[in-house]
Image (cartoon, rainbow, N blue to C red):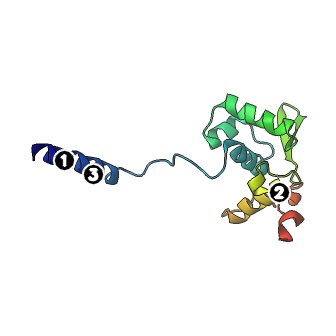
Amino acid sequence: MVAEDAEHAALDTGIESRTSRQPSAPTWTFLTNHGHVLVCIARDPGIRIRDIAERVGITERAAQGIVADLIRAGYVVRTRIGRRNHYEIDPTRPVRHPVEQPHLVGDLLGALAALSDHDTLGSRPGTETLTGSSTSGR
């Protein structure tokens, strides 16, 4: 009986602590950090690595590595303008996972832009292709 009471007390404590917890930050997201970085660049092609890192919640070094990955894979082109970098996304590149085929990066960015409260993708010169024909014909 004593052991049974102790077991119930332990269960009650576990249940109580699980249900009384404050809502915390999510432990996972639907997009990878590479996806988050791509969204940051799409919204602000002149964004600094420091700002990408802050928005995504990663280190500057990790942000630099991800941008380098995206450039190497042909998803992003970096152009130096003075002391700053300007990024351009190739919306015709396919998403990388077979489950998401045959969709393009432009489809993903267009869908995310359509869901945002303020669509900043289509309002910048040179980014019309991100929300253009690649998403409208589906």
Q: Is residue 38 left or right of residue 77?
A: left
Which residue is found at the position 80% from the left and 57% from the top? Answer: 101
Which residue is found at the position 85% from the left and 39% from the top? Answer: 73
Provide the residue designation for mark 1: 9
At label 1, counting other C-alpha atoms closer than 10 Å, the crowd grade (few under 14, some 14-19, many 20 or more) is few
Amino acid marked by disc 2: Gly
Q: Is residue 89 left or right of residue 113?
A: right
Separation of marks 3 and 1 at Cα, in angstroms: 10 Å
User: Up-down: is 79 above or below 109?
Assistant: above
Provide the residue designation for mark 2: 106
Tell me residue 27's x, y (percent): 52, 46
Q: Residue furthest top?
A: 61
Seen from the viewer's position, the closer of residues 6 and 110 is 6
Provide the residue designation for mark 3: 16
* Comes first in the chain, label 3 or label 1: 1
Seen from the viewer's position, the closer of residues 27 and 6 is 6
Disc nearest the viewer among 1 and 2 = 1
Q: Is residue 98 left or right of residue 29?
A: right
Tell me residue 23's x, y (percent): 41, 52
Which residue is found at the position 74% from the left and 62% from the top? Answer: 111
Secondary element type, mark 2: helix
Amino acid marked by disc 1: Ala
Disc nearest the viewer among 2 and 3 = 3
User: In the rendered image, which quarter is residue 53 located in?
Assistant: top right
* Comes first in the chain, label 1 or label 2: 1
Amino acid marked by disc 3: Glu
Which of the image's four quarters has the C terminus? bottom right
Q: Residue furthest bottom?
A: 137
